Amino acid sequence: MSMSREKYQKEKRESVKGNTKKKVRVRLIPIWLRIIIVAALILISVSAGAIVGYSILGNGKPFDVFKSSTWTHISDLVNQGVK
């Protein structure tokens, strides 16, 4: 449960008056935003790894890795003897 800074400060002032100690954590970055940031970083990392692997190790053009023909060719090579 997230709460605004105003509510947090108001509760803090009231808890000082009532001498009840309730610790509330205020997050600077909400959890839903953290999940989106992590997912975006994973997507960027996978894309960069595919570009580096295909262009440097595979001696191909860097952005050919995003073409569907490249992946069908890779899939055909992997599944060549499997039926």
Image: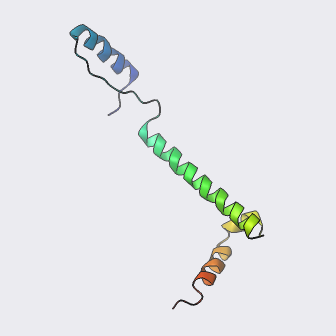
Q: From what the image shows, is residue 70 above or below residue 10? A: below
Q: Quadrant of the N terminus?
A: top left
Image quadrant where residue 15 sits: top left
Q: Nearer the viewer, residue 17 or 52?
A: 52
Q: Residue at x 47, y 41 (%)?
A: 33
Q: Residue at x 68, y 74 (%)?
A: 70
The answer to whether residue 44 is left or right of residue 4 is right
Q: Residue at x 25, y 8 (%)?
A: 17
Residue at the farthest front position: 57
Q: Residue at x 43, y 36 (%)?
A: 30
Q: From what the image shows, is residue 60 above or below residue 77? A: above
The answer to whether residue 72 is left or right of residue 36 is right
Image quadrant where residue 77 sits: bottom right
Q: From what the image shows, is residue 61 above or below residue 83? A: above
The x, y position of residue 38, in whole percent, is 51, 47
Q: How many marks?
A: 0
Q: Tell me how the rendering is colored.
A: rainbow
The x, y position of residue 29, in whole percent, is 47, 34
Q: From what the image shows, is residue 40 above or below residue 67? A: above
